[in-house]
Image: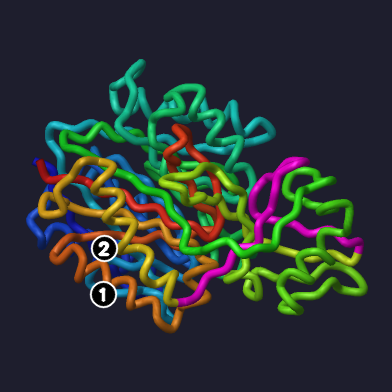
Amino acid sequence: MLRIATAASETPSTIDAATRCIAQVLAQGMDSPVYLMIQADARHDLRVVGAAVQARWPQVRIHAATSCLGSMIETGTYLGQEPGLCLLAVSDADGDYGTACGELGDAPSVAAAALVRQALANADRMGETPAMVWISSTPGHEEAVIAGLQEVVGVSTPIVGGSAADNAIEGKWQVMSDGAAFGSGMVVSVLFPSTPIGAAFHSGYVPTGLRGRITRCAGRRVFEIDGRPAADVYAGWTRGAVGRPEVGAVNILMATALWPLGRRMLAIGGTDIYLLSHPETLDADGSMTLFTDVAVDDELVLMNGTADDLLERPAMVVESACRIGEIDKAQVAGMILVFCAGCMLTVKDRIDEVRRSLNECMPGVPFIAAFTFGEQGPVLAGDNRHGNLMISMVTLARG
């Protein structure tokens, strides 16, 4: 039988926070978890957390990443003045879990493939296909990471996760497994639970009538849309919410959280499904940067959302994850929520409404949240994608 326990602490001392979380898990009767997920404010040192956990549970597989401003579990939201540390522990004697962590280097796709093979070996399941791959990579190479992982596990294996984050886009993010922490790299887990697992990947935005095709770009920088400077096109679409600077570049992340750009992935029941890109900067040269890779001839659609849309969406994604995993809601043992940090910051004063809505939807079910700088998940088209301002949900069944 699979069991899940969560724990949390807010204290400046990383060792104190870790010690308190360990004590909370033990108090819930979980003496020997097999898998541990950690989401922490970037002010905490993940190496210290890992050392404390390994001292108590030497056998446990650890997957840790920093999360913007902190984290959240079913009993509280830990985004206060003191750095938050949240933990989700899994007990599953009949399941297998493996982790690996390392740098991505100059060939992130190759590195990702090597790391997931290490994780499979760590789970003693080499050559097998996991029920799910869970990832936390530092921002910048997410598409290449997914490509490398899919070379090993295939496109039909759900790959779910979120890019590690810090509190002010200063590069202070970290990922960690088994005590080894990296500021530029990835931690990957392979999950072979003994019970069903489900995953869903959604956005909380709707398309507007404004759209255009990329006519010149390089990676995550868009120079032209329909032959015009991309910064001017986007500024026009947002009706002055942002503007092209006269010199240098201007960060527009907060101003554009409710106005992302979407790329159509597929249609379900006559409804178009979009993958989102968060505009990051506008430059005086007329270009704009995004938090996803794009390509020439991609059609960009201006999307729009509201605070209420973002707050209501997680409960809807739970329903989808249960349906996809063919899990009765009454049998859910625990949940993992990936919630874009840009969305969280937009609704920060009301973010506890997400926790309350999940508790109403799934009473008594423990969960952990990651507030991320990019989200990854499976799409119904049959593969996995990286997007921005998205929401992923994983549900694990009891039995």
Measuring 34% from the left and 77% from the top, which residue is drawn there?
352
Is 294 in the magenta? yes
Residue 356's disc number: 1
Which residue is more in the foreground, 122 or 129? 129
* Cα–Cα span, label 2 and label 1: 27 Å
Q: What's the amino acid at mark 1?
A: Arg
**Where is residue 148 shown, x and y percent of the image?**
55, 28
Whether residue 332 is visible, yes or no, is: yes
Is 41 in the magenta? no
| Residue 374, picture quadrant | bottom right
In the rendered image, the residue lying farthest to the front is: 270
Which is more foreground, mark 2 or mark 1?
A: 1
Dot 2 and dot 1 residues touching (CB under 8 Å): no
Q: Is 362 located above or below residue 189 in the figure?
A: below
| Residue 391, picture quadrant | bottom left
User: For the residue carrying disc 2, how many other residues have a C-alpha within 10 Å: few (<14), some (14-19), or many (20+)?
Assistant: some
**Where is residue 324 shown, x and y percent of the image?**
28, 42
For marks 2 and 1 on the same chain, the one whose residue lies earlier in the sequence: 2
Measuring 26% from the left and 63% from the top, which residue is drawn there?
19
Residue matched to label 2: 19
**Where is residue 331 shown, x and y percent of the image?**
11, 49
Residue 119's disc number: none
The answer to whether residue 219 is left or right of residue 193 is: right
Q: Is 309 located above or below residue 151 in the figure?
A: below
How many badges with numbers are in the image?
A: 2
Magenta range: 285-307
Which residue is more in the foreground, 243 or 337? 243
The answer to whether residue 1 is left or right of residue 112 is: left
Whether residue 223 is visible, yes or no, is: no
Measuring 83% from the left and 67% from the top, which residue is drawn there?
249
Quadrant for the C terminus in the image: top left
The answer to whether residue 7 is left or right of residue 156 is: left
